[in-house]
Image (cartoon, rainbow, N blue to C red):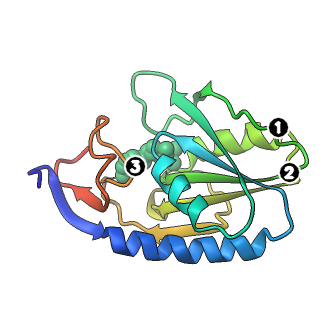
Amino acid sequence: MDEELGEVLFSAEQIAARIRELGETISRDYAGRDLVLAGVLRGAAFFLVDLARALTIPAAIDFIAISSYGPSSKASGVVRIVKDLEEEIAGRDLLVVEDIVDTGLTLGYLLRILRARGPASLKVCTLLDRAVRRIVDHPIAYRGFEVPDKFVVGYGLDYQQRYRNLPFIAALKTPA
Ligand code: IMP
Ligand code: MG
């Protein structure tokens, strides 16, 4: 398809099957609660939308966008909010939906500011977890797949804003 793309790690079918399982578990865990799904733009948009459709319980849908400071956008953990949540989250059950947790620096910042708003609960659901690169650890309540130490694209994940629209997840041949 593209000479930059390497092996397919997760097919569209595998992703859909895993999201069905996550949807069942989350629906069970949050039954009778006031669930707010907060997707981190832009990468988690695809995952959040499919996850929301796999839920059998009511849930509010919201998005937050952050951007990294500085020339090297990787692994600084210094980020600012570009687009905030619109939902009031105090006293509600917030589930942060991420595409991938890598170093954990971005998530650490996000959790800090969201926790300060006083949600009744605050948990994380990530499609991909690259635990080998973790610098700051966070409990991850729901994870789709573990990924090896390779840069991956597709299903929301980009390399220089490309490949987000691939229905599957593949490794990138060119080292990022
Ligand atoms: P962290 O702060 O190092 O955990 O970085 C997390 C963010 O970096 C993710 O939300 C992604 O936006 C981006 N990222 C990390 N690894 C990859 C990857 O393999 N492909 C695409 N984006 C990635
Ligand atoms: Mg992200």
As drawn, which residue projects farthest toward the top? 70
Q: Which residue is mark 3?
A: 156
Q: Are marks 1 and 2 in contact (CB under 8 Å)?
A: yes
How many residues crowd mark 1 within 10 Å: few (<14), some (14–19), many (20+)?
few
| Amino acid type of the residue tagged 2 in the rendering | Arg
Q: Is residue 176 left or right of residue 157?
A: left
Residue 22, by quadrant, is bottom right
Residue topped by disc 1 = 88
Task: Tell me: 62 left or right of 114.
Answer: left
- Residue 97 at x, y = what percent? 60, 53
Residue at mark 2: C-beta within 8 A of ligand 2: no
> Who comes first in sequence, dot 3 or dot 2?
2
Residue at image position (38%, 75%) is 14
Q: Earlier in the sequence, mark 1 or mark 3?
A: 1
Cα gap from disc 3 to disc 2, whole angstroms: 27 Å
Quadrant of the rendered image containing residue 113 = top right
Residue 145, x across and y down, in percent:
46, 70
Disc 2: which residue: 92
Q: CA distance from mark 1 to mark 3?
A: 26 Å
Judge whether residue 134 can be spotted in this image: no
Figure label count: 3
Looking at the image, residue 78 lies above or below residue 91:
above
* Amino acid found under the numbered disc labelled 3: Gly
